[in-house]
Amino acid sequence: MAKKLYVGNLPYTANDAELADFFSKAGAVESAVVMIDKMTGRSRGFGFVSMPNDEEAMKAIESLNGVDMGGRKLTVNEAKPLENRPFRGAPRR
């Protein structure tokens, strides 16, 4: 079963292809997505990588967590499901 990894502290210049290439050192990559801010169109500094099997995903976590990419040390761990969060917007009048 595929394993989804959270990748934090990405360089703001990184794109999907660079992220996939960087993680391919640890194993096969199904998909790599750098999250983009809707308002500015710029990277939000984190993304997600899906790997086809658990062994390669664990290898990626162990070998790439704390590794420098573009002058920034990556944070790599298993992605967790999005939890329900309280609304943070401005109150309506």
Image: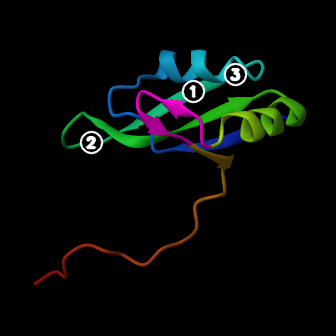
Residue at numbered disc 2: 38
Quarter of the image that includes the N terminus: top right
Work out whether mark 1 precedes mark 2 in sequence or the reverse, and give the earlier one: 1
Residue nearest the observer in this picture, 12 or 67? 67
* Secondary structure state at the residue bearing disc 3: loop
Residue located beneath label 1 in the image: 32
Task: Give residue 30's mark.
Answer: 3
Note whether 88 is above or below 50 in the view shown: below
Q: Distance between the residues labelled 2 and 3?
A: 24 Å
Q: What stretch of residues is rendered in magenta?
A: 66-74
Against 38, residue 68 (above or below) is above
Image point 42% across, 27% down: which residue? 70
Label 1 close to label 3 by CB (< 8 Å) = no
Disc ID at residue 18 = none
Q: In this view, does 86 lie above or below 35?
A: below
**Residue 37 falls in image quadrant:** top left
Q: Is residue 26 above or below residue 2?
A: above
Please tell me whether mark 2 sits on a helix, a strand or a loop. Answer: loop
Packing grade of label 3 (10 A; few <14, some 14-19, many >=20) is some
Q: Position of residue 46 (x, y in %)?
A: 46, 42
Q: Distance between the residues labelled 1 and 2?
A: 18 Å
Question: Of tags 1 and 2, which is closer to the observer?
Answer: 1
Please say whether residue 67 is visible from this viewpoint. yes
Q: How far apart are marks 1 and 3 (CA)?
A: 7 Å
Can you tell which quarter of the image residue 51 is in?
top right
Q: Where is residue 16 in the image (x, y as percent from the top left)?
A: 48, 22
Q: Is residue 2 visible?
A: no
Residue 83: x and y, percent? 58, 68
